[in-house]
Image (spheres, rainbow, N blue to C red):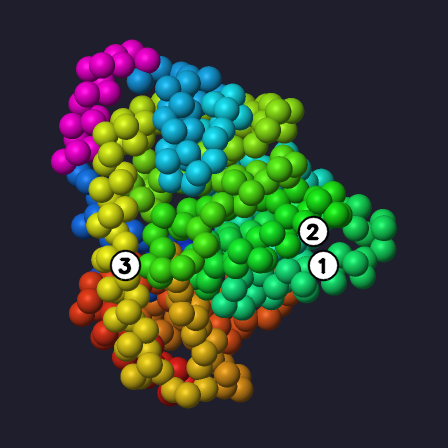
Protein backbone atom coordinates (compact mmCIF):
# COMPACT_ATOMS: atom_id res chain seq x y z
CA UNK A 1 0.00 0.00 0.00
CA UNK A 2 1.24 3.46 -0.88
CA UNK A 3 2.71 5.48 2.01
CA UNK A 4 1.02 8.86 1.86
CA UNK A 5 2.76 10.35 4.90
CA UNK A 6 5.46 12.13 2.90
CA UNK A 7 2.79 14.11 1.06
CA UNK A 8 1.08 15.53 4.14
CA UNK A 9 1.33 19.18 5.07
CA UNK A 10 2.58 20.19 8.49
CA UNK A 11 -1.02 20.95 9.44
CA UNK A 12 -2.20 17.49 8.40
CA UNK A 13 0.65 15.91 10.32
CA UNK A 14 -0.13 17.67 13.58
CA UNK A 15 -3.93 17.89 13.39
CA UNK A 16 -5.88 15.93 15.96
CA UNK A 17 -9.33 14.45 15.68
CA UNK A 18 -12.22 16.22 17.37
CA UNK A 19 -13.13 14.05 20.34
CA UNK A 20 -16.80 14.95 19.95
CA UNK A 21 -16.97 13.93 16.29
CA UNK A 22 -15.07 10.70 16.96
CA UNK A 23 -17.31 9.77 19.87
CA UNK A 24 -20.49 10.48 17.92
CA UNK A 25 -19.25 8.29 15.05
CA UNK A 26 -18.64 5.41 17.46
CA UNK A 27 -22.03 5.82 19.12
CA UNK A 28 -23.85 5.51 15.79
CA UNK A 29 -23.25 1.75 16.03
CA UNK A 30 -23.94 1.41 19.78
CA UNK A 31 -27.62 1.98 20.30
CA UNK A 32 -27.59 0.70 23.88
CA UNK A 33 -25.27 3.48 25.06
CA UNK A 34 -26.77 6.56 26.72
CA UNK A 35 -24.96 9.48 25.16
CA UNK A 36 -24.24 12.73 26.98
CA UNK A 37 -21.53 13.46 24.42
CA UNK A 38 -22.65 15.82 21.66
CA UNK A 39 -24.10 19.31 21.80
CA UNK A 40 -27.17 17.94 20.12
CA UNK A 41 -30.56 19.67 20.25
CA UNK A 42 -33.61 17.64 21.21
CA UNK A 43 -35.06 16.56 17.83
CA UNK A 44 -38.60 16.93 19.16
CA UNK A 45 -38.01 20.68 18.83
CA UNK A 46 -37.31 20.55 15.10
CA UNK A 47 -40.18 22.33 13.32
CA UNK A 48 -40.36 19.69 10.63
CA UNK A 49 -43.75 20.56 9.16
CA UNK A 50 -42.96 24.29 9.04
CA UNK A 51 -39.63 23.55 7.34
CA UNK A 52 -41.36 21.34 4.77
CA UNK A 53 -43.66 24.24 3.91
CA UNK A 54 -40.82 26.77 3.88
CA UNK A 55 -38.63 24.58 1.65
CA UNK A 56 -41.47 24.17 -0.84
CA UNK A 57 -42.25 27.89 -0.79
CA UNK A 58 -38.59 28.79 -1.27
CA UNK A 59 -38.39 26.63 -4.39
CA UNK A 60 -41.64 28.06 -5.74
CA UNK A 61 -41.06 31.73 -4.85
CA UNK A 62 -37.34 32.14 -5.40
CA UNK A 63 -37.01 29.61 -8.20
CA UNK A 64 -33.59 29.44 -9.76
CA UNK A 65 -32.05 31.92 -7.29
CA UNK A 66 -32.48 29.50 -4.38
CA UNK A 67 -30.59 26.76 -6.23
CA UNK A 68 -27.91 28.93 -7.81
CA UNK A 69 -24.53 30.24 -6.67
CA UNK A 70 -24.77 33.36 -4.52
CA UNK A 71 -22.36 36.05 -3.36
CA UNK A 72 -19.77 35.16 -0.74
CA UNK A 73 -21.28 37.40 1.93
CA UNK A 74 -24.61 35.68 1.58
CA UNK A 75 -27.94 36.42 -0.04
CA UNK A 76 -28.89 40.07 0.51
CA UNK A 77 -32.40 39.26 1.76
CA UNK A 78 -30.94 36.78 4.23
CA UNK A 79 -28.48 39.31 5.62
CA UNK A 80 -31.34 41.79 6.01
CA UNK A 81 -33.33 39.19 7.93
CA UNK A 82 -30.35 38.49 10.20
CA UNK A 83 -29.93 42.19 10.97
CA UNK A 84 -33.60 42.50 11.93
CA UNK A 85 -33.33 39.34 14.02
CA UNK A 86 -30.26 40.69 15.84
CA UNK A 87 -32.00 43.96 16.63
CA UNK A 88 -35.12 42.18 17.90
CA UNK A 89 -33.24 39.58 19.97
CA UNK A 90 -29.96 41.25 20.91
CA UNK A 91 -30.70 44.96 20.82
CA UNK A 92 -28.02 46.11 18.43
CA UNK A 93 -28.25 47.37 14.87
CA UNK A 94 -26.01 46.12 12.09
CA UNK A 95 -25.48 47.14 8.50
CA UNK A 96 -26.22 44.25 6.15
CA UNK A 97 -22.88 45.01 4.43
CA UNK A 98 -21.13 44.00 7.65
CA UNK A 99 -22.88 40.61 7.85
CA UNK A 100 -21.32 37.48 6.38
CA UNK A 101 -23.40 34.30 6.26
CA UNK A 102 -21.31 31.25 7.15
CA UNK A 103 -21.68 27.49 7.02
CA UNK A 104 -22.44 27.24 10.72
CA UNK A 105 -20.45 28.98 13.43
CA UNK A 106 -17.61 26.46 13.19
CA UNK A 107 -16.85 27.71 9.69
CA UNK A 108 -16.97 31.26 11.06
CA UNK A 109 -14.34 30.39 13.68
CA UNK A 110 -12.10 28.80 11.05
CA UNK A 111 -12.40 31.75 8.65
CA UNK A 112 -11.70 34.31 11.37
CA UNK A 113 -8.67 32.32 12.53
CA UNK A 114 -7.36 32.28 8.96
CA UNK A 115 -7.99 36.03 8.66
CA UNK A 116 -6.34 37.14 11.90
CA UNK A 117 -3.71 34.60 12.92
CA UNK A 118 -0.17 33.91 11.78
CA UNK A 119 1.88 31.10 13.33
CA UNK A 120 3.01 32.21 16.77
CA UNK A 121 0.22 34.72 17.32
CA UNK A 122 -1.59 34.50 20.64
CA UNK A 123 -5.29 34.01 21.40
CA UNK A 124 -6.59 34.42 24.94
CA UNK A 125 -9.55 32.21 25.81
CA UNK A 126 -11.63 31.19 28.76
CA UNK A 127 -10.30 28.05 30.42
CA UNK A 128 -12.04 25.68 29.85
CA UNK A 129 -13.40 26.79 26.48
CA UNK A 130 -15.07 25.36 23.37
CA UNK A 131 -12.74 22.65 22.09
CA UNK A 132 -13.52 23.12 18.38
CA UNK A 133 -12.66 26.83 18.64
CA UNK A 134 -9.40 25.86 20.34
CA UNK A 135 -8.74 23.49 17.44
CA UNK A 136 -9.45 26.13 14.80
CA UNK A 137 -7.07 28.60 16.42
CA UNK A 138 -4.32 25.98 16.79
CA UNK A 139 -4.73 24.89 13.17
CA UNK A 140 -4.04 28.48 12.13
CA UNK A 141 -0.83 28.44 14.18
CA UNK A 142 -2.20 30.27 17.20
CA UNK A 143 -0.79 29.89 20.71
CA UNK A 144 -3.45 29.85 23.40
CA UNK A 145 -3.44 31.36 26.87
CA UNK A 146 -6.29 30.38 29.17
CA UNK A 147 -8.02 32.48 31.81
CA UNK A 148 -9.90 30.59 34.51
CA UNK A 149 -13.65 31.04 34.89
CA UNK A 150 -16.05 30.97 37.83
CA UNK A 151 -19.81 31.32 38.17
CA UNK A 152 -19.57 34.82 36.65
CA UNK A 153 -17.55 33.88 33.60
CA UNK A 154 -13.97 34.76 32.71
CA UNK A 155 -12.00 36.24 35.61
CA UNK A 156 -11.21 39.52 33.89
CA UNK A 157 -8.93 40.69 36.70
CA UNK A 158 -6.77 37.63 35.98
CA UNK A 159 -6.88 38.48 32.27
CA UNK A 160 -5.60 41.97 32.99
CA UNK A 161 -2.83 40.61 35.21
CA UNK A 162 -1.72 38.28 32.41
CA UNK A 163 -1.56 41.13 29.89
CA UNK A 164 0.14 43.48 32.33
CA UNK A 165 2.85 40.91 33.09
CA UNK A 166 3.74 40.39 29.42
CA UNK A 167 6.63 42.13 27.73
CA UNK A 168 5.69 44.57 24.97
CA UNK A 169 6.98 42.14 22.35
CA UNK A 170 4.91 39.26 23.74
CA UNK A 171 1.83 41.45 24.15
CA UNK A 172 2.08 42.60 20.52
CA UNK A 173 1.47 38.99 19.44
CA UNK A 174 -1.92 38.83 21.17
CA UNK A 175 -4.53 39.21 18.41
CA UNK A 176 -7.85 38.70 20.15
CA UNK A 177 -9.73 37.46 23.19
CA UNK A 178 -12.18 34.64 22.49
CA UNK A 179 -15.22 34.40 24.74
CA UNK A 180 -18.64 32.75 24.94
CA UNK A 181 -20.07 35.32 27.35
CA UNK A 182 -23.55 33.87 27.87
CA UNK A 183 -24.26 30.23 28.82
CA UNK A 184 -20.66 29.34 28.08
CA UNK A 185 -19.61 26.06 26.48
CA UNK A 186 -18.68 23.85 28.31
CA UNK A 187 -19.59 25.22 31.76
CA UNK A 188 -22.89 27.04 31.13
CA UNK A 189 -21.83 30.11 33.15
CA UNK A 190 -22.29 33.73 32.05
CA UNK A 191 -20.14 36.83 32.17
CA UNK A 192 -21.46 39.37 34.67
CA UNK A 193 -22.32 42.93 33.64
CA UNK A 194 -19.29 44.26 35.50
CA UNK A 195 -16.94 41.83 33.79
CA UNK A 196 -18.39 42.60 30.37
CA UNK A 197 -17.60 46.25 30.94
CA UNK A 198 -14.15 45.39 32.27
CA UNK A 199 -13.41 43.12 29.30
CA UNK A 200 -14.19 45.91 26.85
CA UNK A 201 -12.02 48.29 28.85
CA UNK A 202 -9.14 45.80 28.75
CA UNK A 203 -9.51 45.35 24.99
CA UNK A 204 -9.39 49.13 24.54
CA UNK A 205 -6.44 49.62 26.90
CA UNK A 206 -4.30 46.94 25.23
CA UNK A 207 -5.63 47.50 21.68
CA UNK A 208 -7.12 44.01 21.22
CA UNK A 209 -10.07 42.55 19.36
CA UNK A 210 -12.75 40.43 21.03
CA UNK A 211 -14.27 37.44 19.27
CA UNK A 212 -17.73 36.93 20.78
CA UNK A 213 -19.28 33.51 20.14
CA UNK A 214 -22.99 33.58 20.92
CA UNK A 215 -24.92 30.38 20.16
CA UNK A 216 -26.55 29.87 23.56
CA UNK A 217 -27.87 33.21 24.84
CA UNK A 218 -31.24 32.42 23.26
CA UNK A 219 -31.57 29.52 25.71
CA UNK A 220 -31.17 30.99 29.21
CA UNK A 221 -33.19 29.53 32.08
CA UNK A 222 -32.51 31.83 35.01
CA UNK A 223 -33.90 35.28 35.76
CA UNK A 224 -31.44 38.10 36.24
CA UNK A 225 -28.79 36.80 33.84
CA UNK A 226 -27.34 39.62 31.76
CA UNK A 227 -27.83 38.45 28.18
CA UNK A 228 -26.59 41.70 26.63
CA UNK A 229 -24.05 40.90 23.91
CA UNK A 230 -20.64 42.52 24.08
CA UNK A 231 -21.39 43.68 20.53
CA UNK A 232 -24.23 45.84 21.85
CA UNK A 233 -21.84 47.51 24.31
CA UNK A 234 -18.97 47.97 21.86
CA UNK A 235 -18.26 51.61 21.02
CA UNK A 236 -14.90 51.15 19.29
CA UNK A 237 -15.58 48.41 16.75
CA UNK A 238 -13.48 45.85 18.63
CA UNK A 239 -16.05 43.05 18.84
CA UNK A 240 -16.43 40.47 16.10
CA UNK A 241 -19.75 38.73 16.69
CA UNK A 242 -20.66 35.15 15.72
CA UNK A 243 -24.00 33.41 16.05
CA UNK A 244 -25.89 30.50 14.52
CA UNK A 245 -29.29 28.84 14.12
CA UNK A 246 -27.90 25.40 15.02
CA UNK A 247 -29.34 25.37 18.55
CA UNK A 248 -32.54 27.30 17.81
CA UNK A 249 -33.76 25.90 14.48
CA UNK A 250 -31.79 22.92 13.11
CA UNK A 251 -28.03 22.25 12.97
CA UNK A 252 -28.39 20.33 9.72
CA UNK A 253 -29.14 23.57 7.86
CA UNK A 254 -25.55 24.70 8.66
CA UNK A 255 -26.15 28.44 8.78
CA UNK A 256 -24.38 30.96 10.99
CA UNK A 257 -23.13 34.51 10.62
CA UNK A 258 -20.30 36.91 11.38
CA UNK A 259 -20.88 40.59 12.13
CA UNK A 260 -17.84 42.87 12.05
CA UNK A 261 -17.04 46.29 10.59
CA UNK A 262 -15.65 47.95 7.48
CA UNK A 263 -12.31 46.67 6.15
CA UNK A 264 -12.30 43.73 8.55
CA UNK A 265 -15.56 42.48 7.04
CA UNK A 266 -14.03 42.73 3.59
CA UNK A 267 -10.94 40.77 4.62
CA UNK A 268 -13.06 38.02 6.18
CA UNK A 269 -15.14 37.89 3.00
CA UNK A 270 -12.02 37.50 0.84
CA UNK A 271 -10.76 34.63 2.97
CA UNK A 272 -14.17 32.93 2.81
CA UNK A 273 -14.11 33.12 -1.00
CA UNK A 274 -11.32 30.54 -1.05
CA UNK A 275 -12.78 28.40 1.73
CA UNK A 276 -16.22 27.59 0.33
CA UNK A 277 -17.19 30.29 -2.24
CA UNK A 278 -20.40 30.85 -0.25
CA UNK A 279 -22.66 29.07 2.20
CA UNK A 280 -25.57 27.00 0.81
CA UNK A 281 -28.01 29.32 -0.94
CA UNK A 282 -31.02 27.08 -0.40
CA UNK A 283 -30.64 26.83 3.37
CA UNK A 284 -29.90 30.54 3.56
CA UNK A 285 -33.35 31.25 2.10
CA UNK A 286 -34.93 28.69 4.43
CA UNK A 287 -33.32 30.41 7.42
CA UNK A 288 -34.53 33.84 6.34
CA UNK A 289 -38.07 32.58 5.96
CA UNK A 290 -37.93 30.85 9.35
CA UNK A 291 -36.94 34.19 10.88
CA UNK A 292 -39.62 36.15 9.03
CA UNK A 293 -42.41 33.68 9.87
CA UNK A 294 -41.52 33.50 13.56
CA UNK A 295 -40.63 29.82 13.40
CA UNK A 296 -37.36 30.36 15.29
CA UNK A 297 -39.22 32.31 17.98
CA UNK A 298 -41.55 29.34 18.46
CA UNK A 299 -38.65 26.90 18.74
CA UNK A 300 -36.95 29.10 21.35
CA UNK A 301 -40.16 29.42 23.38
CA UNK A 302 -40.45 25.62 23.47
CA UNK A 303 -36.74 24.97 24.02
CA UNK A 304 -36.30 27.05 27.18
CA UNK A 305 -38.76 25.17 29.44
CA UNK A 306 -37.79 21.80 27.96
CA UNK A 307 -34.06 22.27 28.48
CA UNK A 308 -34.58 23.81 31.91
CA UNK A 309 -36.53 20.73 32.99
CA UNK A 310 -33.79 18.45 31.66
CA UNK A 311 -31.06 20.49 33.32
CA UNK A 312 -32.91 20.44 36.64
CA UNK A 313 -33.43 16.69 36.42
CA UNK A 314 -29.77 16.05 35.64
CA UNK A 315 -28.57 18.28 38.48
CA UNK A 316 -30.96 16.50 40.87
CA UNK A 317 -29.68 13.10 39.74
CA UNK A 318 -26.06 14.24 40.10
CA UNK A 319 -26.73 15.51 43.61
CA UNK A 320 -28.24 12.15 44.53
CA UNK A 321 -25.67 9.85 42.93
CA UNK A 322 -22.34 11.63 42.37
CA UNK A 323 -19.78 11.14 45.16
CA UNK A 324 -18.72 14.04 47.39
CA UNK A 325 -15.33 14.35 45.67
CA UNK A 326 -16.93 15.74 42.48
CA UNK A 327 -17.76 19.32 41.50
CA UNK A 328 -20.10 20.30 38.69
CA UNK A 329 -21.32 23.57 37.24
CA UNK A 330 -24.86 24.91 37.65
CA UNK A 331 -25.48 26.22 34.13
CA UNK A 332 -27.74 29.25 33.68
CA UNK A 333 -28.46 28.21 30.11
CA UNK A 334 -27.14 26.29 27.13
CA UNK A 335 -26.88 22.53 26.84
CA UNK A 336 -24.09 21.36 29.14
CA UNK A 337 -22.89 20.65 32.66
CA UNK A 338 -19.14 20.51 33.26
CA UNK A 339 -17.83 18.26 36.01
CA UNK A 340 -14.52 17.62 37.78
CA UNK A 341 -13.67 14.44 39.68
CA UNK A 342 -11.19 15.15 42.49
CA UNK A 343 -9.97 11.60 42.91
CA UNK A 344 -6.30 10.73 42.46
CA UNK A 345 -5.61 9.07 39.13
CA UNK A 346 -9.04 9.71 37.64
CA UNK A 347 -8.62 10.29 33.88
CA UNK A 348 -11.87 10.82 31.99
CA UNK A 349 -10.20 10.38 28.59
CA UNK A 350 -8.61 7.05 29.42
CA UNK A 351 -11.84 5.82 31.01
CA UNK A 352 -14.11 6.71 28.08
CA UNK A 353 -13.75 3.36 26.21
CA UNK A 354 -14.60 1.56 29.46
CA UNK A 355 -17.55 3.90 30.03
CA UNK A 356 -18.93 3.07 26.59
CA UNK A 357 -18.27 -0.69 26.61
CA UNK A 358 -18.98 -1.62 30.23
CA UNK A 359 -21.15 1.12 31.70
CA UNK A 360 -22.98 1.99 28.46
CA UNK A 361 -22.70 5.75 28.95
CA UNK A 362 -20.76 8.39 27.01
CA UNK A 363 -19.50 11.90 27.72
CA UNK A 364 -16.81 14.18 26.32
CA UNK A 365 -13.50 14.11 28.24
CA UNK A 366 -12.71 17.58 29.53
CA UNK A 367 -8.99 17.76 28.82
CA UNK A 368 -9.50 19.07 25.29
CA UNK A 369 -11.48 22.03 26.62
CA UNK A 370 -8.44 23.25 28.55
CA UNK A 371 -5.56 25.06 26.88
CA UNK A 372 -2.93 24.43 29.55
CA UNK A 373 -2.81 20.66 29.91
CA UNK A 374 -5.20 20.52 32.84
CA UNK A 375 -8.61 18.89 32.93
CA UNK A 376 -7.83 15.17 32.63
CA UNK A 377 -10.18 14.73 35.60
CA UNK A 378 -13.07 16.58 33.95
CA UNK A 379 -15.90 15.86 31.55
CA UNK A 380 -18.62 17.70 29.65
CA UNK A 381 -22.10 16.24 30.06
CA UNK A 382 -24.93 17.15 27.69
CA UNK A 383 -28.52 17.22 28.93
CA UNK A 384 -30.44 18.41 25.87
CA UNK A 385 -30.58 15.27 23.76
CA UNK A 386 -31.41 12.43 26.13
CA UNK A 387 -34.91 11.59 27.36
CA UNK A 388 -35.82 12.11 31.01
CA UNK A 389 -35.50 8.37 31.66
CA UNK A 390 -32.08 8.28 29.97
CA UNK A 391 -30.87 11.23 32.05
CA UNK A 392 -31.71 9.45 35.32
CA UNK A 393 -30.26 6.11 34.24
CA UNK A 394 -27.24 7.64 32.52
CA UNK A 395 -26.23 9.68 35.57
CA UNK A 396 -26.51 6.55 37.73
CA UNK A 397 -24.19 4.74 35.32
CA UNK A 398 -21.76 7.66 35.23
CA UNK A 399 -21.73 7.85 39.03
CA UNK A 400 -20.94 4.13 39.20
CA UNK A 401 -18.08 4.59 36.73
CA UNK A 402 -16.63 7.38 38.90
CA UNK A 403 -16.93 5.42 42.14
CA UNK A 404 -15.52 2.17 40.73
CA UNK A 405 -12.56 3.72 38.89
Q: Is residue 85 left or right of residue 263?
A: left
Over which residues does the magenta segment extend?
49-65
Q: Is residue 401 left or right of residue 386?
A: right
What is the number of the mark on residue 80? none
Query: Is residue 82 visible in this depiction of the protein?
Result: no
Q: Quadrant of the C terminus?
A: bottom left
Residue 57: say if magenta.
yes
Residue 229: image x %, image y %?
49, 45
Q: Secondary structure at mark 1?
A: helix
Q: Is residue 19 left or right of residue 143?
A: left
User: Does the CB distance between marks 2 and 3 fall below 8 Å?
Assistant: no
Query: Is residue 159 visible in this depiction of the protein?
Result: yes
Residue at (31% x, 44% y) in the render:
248
Residue 167: image x %, image y %?
85, 55
Residue that label 3 marks: 307
Residue at (66% x, 42% y) in the render:
209
User: Does the CB distance between marks 2 and 1 fall below 8 Å?
Assistant: yes
Main SS, magenta residues: helix
* Real-space CA distance between mark 2 and mark 3, rounded to the nearest whole angstrom: 34 Å
Q: Is residue 339 left or right of residue 288?
A: right
The image quarter in which residue 90 lies:
top left
Between 196 and 218, the residue placed more toward the observer is 196
Residue at the extreme top:
64
Residue at (67% x, 63% y) in the render:
157
Q: Secondary structure at mark 3?
A: helix
Q: Considering only order in the chain, which callout, 3 or 2, is on the residue closer to the N terminus?
A: 2
Residue at (80% x, 46% y) in the render:
172
Q: Considering only order in the chain, which callout, 3 or 1, is on the residue closer to the N terminus?
A: 1
What is the number of the mark on residue 160? 1
Residue that label 2 marks: 202
Amino acid sequence: MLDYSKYYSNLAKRIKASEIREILAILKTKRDVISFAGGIPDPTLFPKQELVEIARDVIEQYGDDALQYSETKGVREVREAVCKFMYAKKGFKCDLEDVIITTGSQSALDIIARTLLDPGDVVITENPSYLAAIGAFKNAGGRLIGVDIDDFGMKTHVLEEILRSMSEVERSKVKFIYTIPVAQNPAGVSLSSERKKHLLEIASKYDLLILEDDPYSYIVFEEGVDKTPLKALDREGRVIYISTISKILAPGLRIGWIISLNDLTRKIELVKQYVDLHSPTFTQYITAEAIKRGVIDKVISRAIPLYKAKRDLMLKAMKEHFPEYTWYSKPVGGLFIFAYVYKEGFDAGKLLPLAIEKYKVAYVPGGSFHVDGRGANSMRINFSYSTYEQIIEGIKRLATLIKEN
